[in-house]
Structure formats: structure tokens, C-alpha cells
Amino acid sequence: MNEKQLEDVLPLAGRRVLVTRAVHQAGKLSDGLKALGAEPVEVPVMEIRPPDSYEPLDAALRKLSSFDWLVLTSVNTVQAMAARCSKLDVDVSGIKLLKVAAVGGATAEAARKADFRVTVVPDSYTSEGVVGALGDSILAKRVLLARAKVARDVIPDTLANAGALMTVVDAYQTGLPDGARERLVEALKVGVDAATFTSSSSVRNLAEVAKEACVEFPLAGVAGISIGPVTSATMREFGWAPAGEAAVSDLPSLIEAVVKVMQGTADRV
């Protein structure tokens, strides 16, 4: 097999790609990168933790049938919601009038496995994506948005401005796992070609880990690639211009974006 044929089959051969996902989620992205010849370098910078209090989430779940829409923003959100529903004996499959919007294909798949009746699947967690998918169906309707605890989020305000009667609850929060600083330092000793980001939290947390490790951020000489426009915006807030962005907010598209960046064919973000 000549060099051109090898590049066609393994377009990421010899590339080291930083994977910042939580330990329990890194495998799928790492496997996809490895299948294309990359060496995934796992430095988890997120750990999923309970919210500060379950009271707001539990209160919303106990009256779930009173909502017209439920918006699920991630697989982590689905898992947290399903766990609390189980604890509270809330049967989501029996609430036939509740419409569910699950952002992205992976979230929708997880939601269906957890017995949520998915109605709409917005491609991305952006103002345009969510409001565009829901359209006029949220006008004067009660909408429950479950998400991670975040510092800033424009989506609830956008939905409210579109006429929704919003209730927002934290389903979980993220924290820094033990050993992240040491793992980052070891990874950078060998060097990495690209870093993947699957959420705004992964950007913020990597920046915090880098600060603790006395490492320059953005990482010098490393191409940063995001899963979507919200994550890209967070990268820019930290001074890291995205080298690439997934066309659709899912892992296959993120991996495709990595390939394009490494081959020099990525569109300008």
C-alpha cells in the first residue's frame, strides 16, 4: 500500500488527538479516531456530579404531566432525568400529551431507550436550532428545559422570547476529575496535533486544568475542533479560534471535522 492509499484508508495515521470527554463517554470518540489511524490521547476534564440540590428537578418531575414540552439537551441530561424518574416512580412513557425535544441524534437515542417519547430532534443546541425545530408549537406552552448547571445559557431566554412559559432545572453539574492536571502534562510532553471539544464545559474545564498545570492556554500549536457553534463560541471566549467545527452536533461529524482539519481541507469557522 503506497502513501496515498494509506492516507485514504487511515487519514489520521500518526496524529495524536486530545479527547477531553468524561471517562465513561470517551470510548466512542476514541474508537472512532483510532479506526482512522489516530492515537487518541484521553485527558478527561469533566466528571459528572449531582446538582447542588435535587429539589427543583424532583419538583418538576413530580408534575411532569403539567408540561407541554420537555427539552433534553444531552445524553448526560437524559441519564440524570431517567435516574430521578426511577427514584420518584415517575413513568415518562405514560405521559402521552408530553412532547419531547432531544437535541442531537445521540440524545434522542438515549431518550428513547429511557422511554421518553421523542417528538423533535433539533440538530444543534443553538438558539436557531432549538427554536427553529419547535417553531410556533411552544407559543404560550409550558416548557421544561433540563440541562447541566452552567454559568451562562441563552437558550432559555430565546425560548421565552419566542413565547414559551419556561421552567429551567439543573439535572447535573460537572467538575474536574482527580489527576487531570498530571494527565495533561504527560500528554503534552509527547505532543498532540489536535484537541476535540464536545461541550462548552470541556473548553472551560480544560482551560482550568491548563492553568493549574501552568500550561499556556490555548494549547500552543494544537488545532482545536468543536462539536458545534455554541462550543466554538466558548472557545473564542478563551482566545482559541476553532480550526474546525462539526457540521452536525454529533461524534461522527466531529471526527469528520478532525479529518478535514488534519488534511487541510476544513472550511473556515
Image: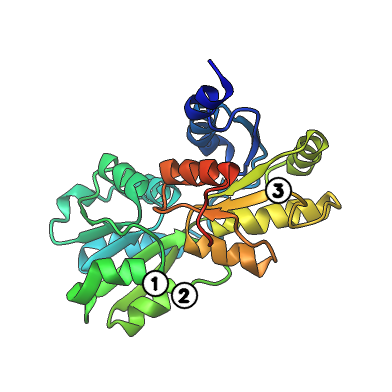
Q: Position of residue 211 (x, y in %)?
A: 80, 56
* Relative to 71, residue 266 above or below: above
Q: Is residue 63 left or right of residue 226?
A: left
Dot 2 or dot 3: first in sequence order is: 2
Q: The residue under label 3 is which amino acid type? A: Val
Whether pointer 2 and pointer 1 mark residues with C-beta atoms closer than 8 Å, the reply is: yes
Question: Which residue is under mark 3?
Answer: 222
Residue 36 visible in the snapshot: yes
Circle 2 packing at 10 Å, graded few (<14), some (14-19), many (20+), is few
Residue 121, by quadrant, is bottom left
Question: Which residue is under mark 2?
Answer: 154
Along the line of sight, the residue nearer the viewer: 23 or 191: 191
Circle 1 packing at 10 Å, graded few (<14), some (14-19), many (20+), is some
Whether pointer 2 and pointer 3 mark residues with C-beta atoms closer than 8 Å, the reply is: no
Determine whether the residue tagged by mark 2 lies in a helix, strand or loop: loop
| x 79%, y 33%: residue | 190
Circle 3 packing at 10 Å, graded few (<14), some (14-19), many (20+), is some
| x 52%, y 45%: residue | 260
Q: The residue under label 1 is which amino acid type? A: Ser
Marks 2/3: CA distance? 29 Å
Determine whether the residue tagged by mark 3 lies in a helix, strand or loop: loop
Which dot, 3 or 1, sits closer to the camera? 3
Q: Residue furthest left?
A: 96
Dot 3 or dot 1: first in sequence order is: 1
Marks 3/1: CA distance? 29 Å
